[in-house]
Amino acid sequence: MARYAEQVELESKPLRVGIAGLGTVGAALIRIIASDANAISRKLGRDIVISAVSARSRSRDRGVDISGINWIDDPVALARSPEVDLFVELMGGEDGPALASVTAALERGCPVVTANKALLARHGVALARLAEENDTQLGFEAAVAGGIPVIKTLREGLGSATVTRVYGIMNGTCNYILTRMGAEGIGFEECLRDAQALGYAETDPTFDVEGYDTAHKLAILASLCFGTEIAADQVFVEGISRITQADIRVAADLGYKIKLLGMARKSDQGIEQRVHPTLVRKTTAIAGVDGVLNAVALETNHVQELLLAGPGAGGDATAASVLSDILDVARDTWVPPLGVPAAELKPCERAPMRVHEGGYYIRLNARDVPGALAAIATRMGESNISLESVIQRPDLRAVEPGVDAESTRTVVLITHETIESAVREALTRVAGDGFIVGQPQLIRIEEF
Amino acid sequence: MARYAEQVELESKPLRVGIAGLGTVGAALIRIIASDANAISRKLGRDIVISAVSARSRSRDRGVDISGINWIDDPVALARSPEVDLFVELMGGEDGPALASVTAALERGCPVVTANKALLARHGVALARLAEENDTQLGFEAAVAGGIPVIKTLREGLGSATVTRVYGIMNGTCNYILTRMGAEGIGFEECLRDAQALGYAETDPTFDVEGYDTAHKLAILASLCFGTEIAADQVFVEGISRITQADIRVAADLGYKIKLLGMARKSDQGIEQRVHPTLVRKTTAIAGVDGVLNAVALETNHVQELLLAGPGAGGDATAASVLSDILDVARDTWVPPLGVPAAELKPCERAPMRVHEGGYYIRLNARDVPGALAAIATRMGESNISLESVIQRPDLRAVEPGVDAESTRTVVLITHETIESAVREALTRVAGDGFIVGQPQLIRIEEF
């Protein structure tokens, strides 16, 4: 029992932390451990010292003084150093030195804290098992939704509640782009360039804008929510690169915002995990989560919805999450890394894409010929799709390459509740009729 | 060290819980412990059993079977029973049996979980100290914002971060009333009656609608945020009973919603704690928190804003929070009840109401005579208050008793940033000029 009296006794033994990877987060962590030294002692009853670091370049200016800290070139050697009580992995990468060093630390019973979502998405179950076998801990609060304590909430905060659904905005790059498209009426490409200039997006933005980053995070959350193995390869993924100004504007006029959501739910058929652009009502709390903010909503058997929103990235917020994990380890709180012992995790059986509730947004470029709209509406009716709204306005024009804006009219259909296969079937028939040009845009609507 | 192997060993020893108070939350707790039995064993590695209960009436139908549970009439005797490993207090009341039984349990080193915000607002520091002296725990997640794990987040989840400001919607009754006034255009009194009929408001609603309930919760949060003693008597409190349809409508037209917020911040001058109706921009996440939902936002030195939103009341959500505390106790996680040892809490020195940033909403009933508006505007200018908007519309009419709607015109002024004393001074002068009738309505605007 780690009681107050015992904690006071521990005061003379600082926790010695080794950090591998000194990018933005690593540098921020060094800075925060120094600036928060008093708060750490007061909250924890003992100090934290950085005993060793490792990074690619020893000489790079990081804005923090590392001259007094032991430098170890090889991160695996750092992870094995007897002078390291806790190993922090901030190098990134799903294999390579990250995997090797985390494995080395856990194998000797040294606790690990990491912010590496790619590593966890791929090796999380094996690493959790390794931590348990060696009676040690693996913390990864910073790996999902940066500064938001969603991992701790799932592991400890929900008590015995069973999560039935999780959804959220987990990629700041996408949310920034969609927010700016909505606020300023500019296109995807221009917003992406600004995001890159501001450091919110990588030079190769594919991983973020096509939804793969969100898929990694969702797969980690789904494991914690449902007690299943992490299965990032089973996530249905669709990114935001095809979202146009027309979509944003029409959605806004109908009372919606477009957000890239990751969603997972458990049903009798298995686990459904999906990432795609989604129309959400402007009046919902999730719609108010703008810019680089992230949010995760949890629905349990006891609580209809719990929403956690905050910064999803940024050096300070991410480093603060890393530090909260370090403090939990120092406090000797022990819970299995994935909420339940790794051996008890069930296989993640993929459920088919659910019968969707809440309708679809469909944008078509219809040929500007008599009877086109009637033919489209007829095909929808044949597939038992009832339409809530049909929007055709002179200001909505095709922008897709290869579609002639002069000879087409943009038509937006909002369906009542229907099933995805019916929508796909109707669109195939509409295309077969020859009344539309290019690919239809299909965006799911979620009612929360 | 409470490791996995040790947890497995504990499996044969269930945690015996005694519950005093079997209202909505107590009954829900009994139901949930039964229905979640498998999840509890799986997550905790041991079982929870209810060994004894106490309530006012033994025979009342609560929808749960308590026939097999030991009944102890006196809650203090229950708290002292050697068959109780953990005492749950759900009776309510800031003194009397709640205080006596919680004290009795802590004195013998028995951990306590309570949902009683009034008890904590008044005796929280003394009880935290008693828990620490007896090397035991005091959990109260359910006392603030029902199903939202804000206490755990403040105690453990933020690591070493220092909270600089906390604000939130912490009373479901008020939020329900304000939401319905906004959505349906009906008055405060009618919404209150509906809230009472639906069980969202007490027969005597004063405690909720006048802001005192929010003040209790805010004082508990402020203690955890700033490491200061709980000081509920130092909260500036203003309720929602004077909010009219005119206020809601004009605010909406200007892009705002009116919410009852509790806010606390630490400055060089001390701790500022206040509860009052507030104009918040519709586009903010907090504005999206509607109906009986609650939300708490935390600003730290590392994270600009973390928002937690969810159900603030309701039997199941509150009982789930009580159970999450029970699980933490069973897991033997130990942190001081108020985040830092009670002996280290600093006195809560009251800061004067802060120089307000973000302007004021002022609604006046001006006499319908020439020169009235000019005189009002002049007085504002004399106090160096610059106006962002002035709204006078035929549909805005006085509704206050004693104000003649025919001979007055409702005028709404939105000021740029100014200080509260300047606004009060200007309004006193305006009243002295004899151009207004009745009391002006003054609502603070917060930009988040």
Image: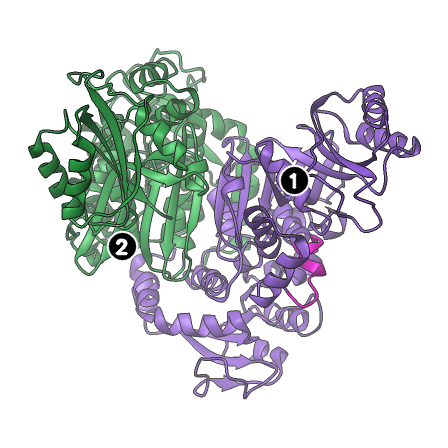
Chain colours: A green, B purple
Q: Position of residue A47 (x, y in %)?
A: 50, 37
| Residue kind at label 1, given as amino acid type | Thr
Q: Position of residue B103 (x, y in %)?
A: 65, 69
* Chain for disc number 1: B
Up-down relation of residue A45 to residue B113 (above or below): above
Q: Which residue is mark 2?
A: A226
Please tell me how crowded label 1 is: few (under 14), some (14-19), or many (20+) other residues with Cα within 10 Å.
Answer: many
Up-down relation of residue A132 to residue B194 (above or below): above
Q: Which residue is mark 1?
A: B278
Question: Which residues, given as a range, are shown in magenta?
Answer: B202-213
| Residue kind at label 2, given as amino acid type | Phe
Residue ID at (36%, 45%): A151
Please tell me how crowded label 2 is: few (under 14), some (14-19), or many (20+) other residues with Cα within 10 Å.
Answer: many
| Residue B347, disc | none
Residue A109 seen in the figure: no
From the image, state whether disc 2 or disc 1 is nearer to you: 1
Residue A202 seen in the figure: yes
Image quarter where the N terminus of chain A lies is bottom left
B248 left or right of B11 in image: right
Quadrant of the rendered image containing residue B168: top right
